[in-house]
């Protein structure tokens, strides 16, 4: 492989990282615009109109459907969260009562122990209390950070919607401009790479949607079996944190289960731990297979790309890692990389 090719690959990886970080709304809007292109072409042929009108219609339909789904889901989730929030004082009061009773029982128990045993037990309790406090602080910090990010999410959403319209208007000219950067001989190969890449990226997104949907169904079934209130909102919260490896479902289920176990509801607490284990095992076993089948790579390659991407660049690497493999495979299928190892 030539030095020029290596430099191009390096620049491409750097641009890919930027697209998934500061350029995320534009990257997502471009994917949506490409996805809607067949619909735009259908409007052009059916209504015999220009691209501007057809792109406006398709983009507006997408915006209406997206906002409608968000509104329907949001109303239900917000209603359940409000109902849950109204009962928070009750939960806090029950926890305080339980703690006070526990302290009273421990005082009686300490009086019957030797000084050495009492000191050791007190040390264990202190360490456990410190761990619980740290866990609660961490979870509270996560919610505070999320609340602080809401204005940024709103701006992200607005930029995303506007970018969809702009990309839809100029998608054909953007492709022609991009292909013009290459000589006549290479344009066919590059066009083939773009076609393979489009199929693989949509396969990747479809795989993520399938995994999230299956996780939501598992969570909802588990919460319903355990008789948990507000299962729809809680199951949605679980799949949101499950997408982020730095958090995971344990950020919701483990502290919740610990609280229930130590406040007199061990059966539900153990049930939540079992649900956490089921979801975790399911994701780790099924994810490489589903992802590999969807984008045309082996389960092992998918697993390695997920892990290496996460280790190198953090949470965003979970998406960049498989995408790098997808781009490489698309380029090989188009004949851009045909080097063989010579000894």
Image (cartoon, helix red, strand yellow):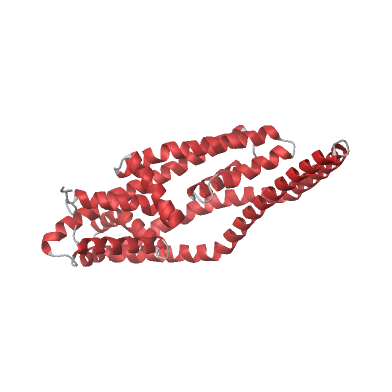
Asked if one can make out residue 49 in the rendered structure from this viewpoint, the answer is no
Residue 89 x, y percent position in the rendering: 75, 50
Please give the name of the residue rendered at 30% of the width and 48% of the height, measured from the top-left corner. Answer: 200
How many numbered marks appear?
0
Nearer to me, 205 or 338 = 338
Query: Which image quadrant for residue 55?
Result: bottom left
Asked if one can make out residue 132 in the rendered structure from this viewpoint, the answer is yes
Please give the name of the residue rendered at 61% of the width and 56% of the height, measured from the top-left corner. Answer: 143
Nearer to me, 44 or 93 = 93
Nearer to me, 172 or 177 = 177
Residue 282 x, y percent position in the rendering: 47, 36
Report whether 338 appears left or right of 121. Answer: left
Please give the name of the residue rendered at 73% of the width and 43% of the height, measured from the top-left corner. Answer: 124
Residue 199 x, y percent position in the rendering: 28, 48
Report whether 63 appears left or right of 120. Answer: left
Report whether 264 appears left or right of 41. Answer: right
Please give the name of the residue rendered at 54% of the width and 36% of the height, measured from the top-left corner. Answer: 277
Q: In this view, does 260 lie above or below 185?
A: above
Quadrant location, the N terminus: bottom left
């Amino acid at each position: 492989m030539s030095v020029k090719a290596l430099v191009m690959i390096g620049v491409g990886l750097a641009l890919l990282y930027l697209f998934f970080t500061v350029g995320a709304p534009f990257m997502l809007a471009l994917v949506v615009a490409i996805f809607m292109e067949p619909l735009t072409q259908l409007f052009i042929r059916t209504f015999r109109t220009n691209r501007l009108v057809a792109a406006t219609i398709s983009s507006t339909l997408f915006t209406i459907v997206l906002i409608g789904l968000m509104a329907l889901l949001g109303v239900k989730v917000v209603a359940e969260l409000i109902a849950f929030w109204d009962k928070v004082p009750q939960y806090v009061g029950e926890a305080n009562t339980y703690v006070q009773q526990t302290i009273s029982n421990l005082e009686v128990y300490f009086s019957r122990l030797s000084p050495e045993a009492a000191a050791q037990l007190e040390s264990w309790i202190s360490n456990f209390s410190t761990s619980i406090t740290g866990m609660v602080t961490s979870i509270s910090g996560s919610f505070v950070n999320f609340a602080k990010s809401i204005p940024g999410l709103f701006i992200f959403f607005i930029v995303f919607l506007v970018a969809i319209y702009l990309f839809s208007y100029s998608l054909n000219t953007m492709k022609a401009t991009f292909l013009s950067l290459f000589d006549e001989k290479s344009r066919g190969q590059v066009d083939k790479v773009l076609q393979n890449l489009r199929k693989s990226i949509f396969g990747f997104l479809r795989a993520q949607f399938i995994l999230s949907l299956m996780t939501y169904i598992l969570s909802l079934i588990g919460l319903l079996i355990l008789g948990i209130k507000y299962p729809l909102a809680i199951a949605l919260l679980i799949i949101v944190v499950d997408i982020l490896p730095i958090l995971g479902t344990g950020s919701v289920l483990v502290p919740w289960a610990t609280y229930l176990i130590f406040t007199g509801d061990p059966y539900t607490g153990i049930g939540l731990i079992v649900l956490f284990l089921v979801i975790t095992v399911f994701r780790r076993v099924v994810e490489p297979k589903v992802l590999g089948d969807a984008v045309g790579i082996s389960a092992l390659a998918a697993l390695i790309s997920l892990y290496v991407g996460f280790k190198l660049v953090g949470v965003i690497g979970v998406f960049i890692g498989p995408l790098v493999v997808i781009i490489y495979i698309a380029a090989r299928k188009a004949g851009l990389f045909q080097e063989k190892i010579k000894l």
